[in-house]
Image: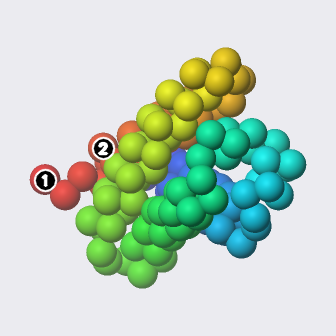
């Protein structure tokens, strides 16, 4: 179980660091051009806030494992990713982008697995 947790943490954290960085450092139009059509429904500032939260959450999932302490950050990062993915699933379902909703549901399940395994209580 521990090895599975490490793999899921590393994979999910890396995905969110990369995608969050991309969205944070690109314009909203560039995000839309690269397939992020969901960004059409949001103001540029909201897209940047979402990107920043994704980036910080991805780092929060990875760093405690590397440092060996601060595991409450893993729980908080995974829980935040779960919240973001819930909103993403809703957005994609409303836009009838079902394949994107399924991908986000997989990320949601990964985040819930990490949050459950790293829960501080």
Which quarter of the picture shows residue 98?
Answer: top right
**At 13% from the left edge and 53% from the top edge, which residue is drawn?**
121
* Residue 19 percent location from the top left of the image: 68, 58
Q: Residue 48 — which label?
A: none
Question: Circle 2 sits in a helix, a strand or a loop, which is it?
Answer: helix
**At 68% from the left edge and 30% from the top edge, which residue is drawn?**
100
Q: Residue 121 — which label?
A: 1
Q: Which residue is mark 2?
A: 116
Q: CA distance from mark 2 to mark 1?
A: 10 Å
Say whether residue 14 is visible: no
* Residue 58 percent location from the top left of the image: 52, 63
The count of marks equals 2
Up-down relation of residue 94 to residue 121 (above or below): above
Which quarter of the picture shows residue 36?
Answer: top right
Nearer-the-camera pick, 4 or 90:
90
Q: Earlier in the sequence, mark 2 or mark 1?
A: 2
**At 54% from the left edge and 37% from the top edge, which residue is drawn?**
88
Q: Residue furthest left?
A: 121
Q: State left or right for residue 87 relative to residue 47.
A: left
**At 70% from the left edge and 23% from the top edge, which residue is drawn?**
97
* Residue 110 percent location from the top left of the image: 49, 41
Q: Residue furthest front?
A: 43
Q: Residue furthest bottom?
A: 67
Question: Circle 1 sits in a helix, a strand or a loop, which is it?
Answer: loop
Up-down relation of residue 32 to residue 15 (above or below): above
Crowdedness near tag 1: few (<14), some (14–19) or many (≥20) residues, C-alpha within 10 Å: few
Up-down relation of residue 77 to residue 103 (above or below): below
Crowdedness near tag 2: few (<14), some (14–19) or many (≥20) residues, C-alpha within 10 Å: some
Q: State left or right for residue 98 relative to residue 50.
A: right
């Amino acid at each position: 179980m521990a090895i599975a947790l490490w793999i899921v943490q590393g994979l999910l954290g890396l995905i969110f660091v990369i995608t969050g960085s991309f969205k944070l450092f690109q314009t909203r139009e560039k995000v839309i051009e690269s397939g992020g059509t969901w960004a059409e429904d949001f103001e540029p500032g909201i897209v940047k806030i979402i990107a920043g939260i994704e980036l910080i959450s991805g780092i929060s999932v990875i760093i405690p494992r590397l440092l060996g302490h601060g595991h409450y950050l893993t729980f908080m990062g995974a829980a935040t990713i779960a919240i973001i993915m819930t909103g993403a699933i809703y957005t994609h379902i409303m836009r009838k982008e079902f394949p994107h909703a399924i991908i986000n549901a997989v990320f949601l399940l990964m985040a819930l697995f990490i949050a459950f395994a790293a829960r501080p209580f």
